[in-house]
Image: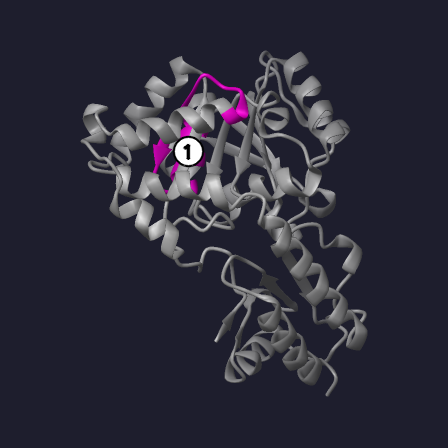
Amino acid sequence: MIDLRSDTVTRPAPGMRAAMARAEVGDDCYGEDPTVAALEERVADLFGHEAAVFVPSGTMGNQICLRLLVPPAEELLCDADAHIVTYEGGGAAQHGGISTRTIVSPRGVLQPDAVAQQLRPEGFRTVVTRAVAVEQTANRAGGAVYPMDVLESLRAVTRSAGVALHCDGARIWNAIVATGLPAAAFGRLFDTMSVCLSKGMGAPVGSLVVCSASRAAVARVLRRRLGGGMRQAGIVAAAGIYALDHHVERLADDHKRARRLARRIADVAPSAVDVDTVQTNMIVLDLSGTGWPAGEFTAAAARHGLLLQLTGPQRVRAVTHLDIDDEDIDSAATLLHGLLGR
């Protein structure tokens, strides 16, 4: 099978497995795992923050960050398709008592003027907006990258209103490679971040909450309450360190392969994909003009050995990643040509 459902399906590379096997470990709940500590320090430094806290998943990282910024019964503002409100099981409401309000944004990228109009201050009998969340890159928008000027404008808008800014950085490494900007250029704009190691970076598990030292202390308490305290977690933290050493720059290969596949698809079904929107490692196919219902299309592709992700009645996603090479892209393109050119 050629698996293009997600960049979460990767398996640890041999070098990563070796790094995990030789990792020095301790009990992280006692703060005694040196490999976890090294990963946390490195990621905090990369993004220009005081501290980072290793957590099992990006969802937990996001939920901890929201609780650091938004008191119960107060408000988070984000895009209507943001992962936080689409794929995290209502966790902000369930665990944090947080009210969320959403804005439909072009390609999942919040626009500063629209955000400024929606921020609700104290004193008007409305739910007070305490934080705005952006998703870098925007998953349901096909890996769209927030431009730096937009992020800087959002930071100016939120700062002037006394509102916090959070980054769901599940694929921020892709944005770093796509823009050529250093991690600290993004990190300086956010009060909290959740950055993931288990997607394009190829680690088997793990994300980090990036924030101030005082917030990190609270984050550790919240992590424990959510069941995220880990013991000899250095084994998986070592995978994250290996990913930082070996798998950041190579994300450019995933981006090139995604654009290559998109161009091949556009050759036979130009209405299905806009090649110019493929910025990182995701391709969104709009099948509305092809005669294929998305569910039937993904089933047909699977029968021929290609796995795609169903994301709507007429939408399908393909994601390039560490375990996909040029031969896989050529095979996928040939198969999709056959299906779309019928």
Q: Specify whether residue 55 is painted magenta.
A: yes
Question: Pointer 1: what residue?
Answer: 208
The answer to whether residue 87 is left or right of residue 229 is right
Query: Depth check: 218 or 8 in front?
Result: 8
The amino acid sitting under disc 1 is Leu
User: Can residue 93 be seen?
Assistant: no
Query: Depth check: 14 or 139 in front?
Result: 14
Q: Dot 1 lies on which element? A: strand
User: Can residue 44 be seen?
Assistant: yes
Rendering coords of residue 310 (x, y %): 56, 67
Compared with 179, 52 (above or below) is above
Assess disc 1: are there few (<14), some (14-19) or many (≥20) residues with their C-alpha within 10 Å of its C-alpha: many
Rendering coords of residue 282 (x, y %): 63, 56
Residue range highlighted in magenta? 46-67
The answer to whether residue 53 is left or right of residue 100 is left
**Which residue is pictured at 37% across the width and 49% down the height?**
16
Compared with 91, 116 (above or below) is above
**Which residue is pictured at 39% across the width and 13% down the height?**
214
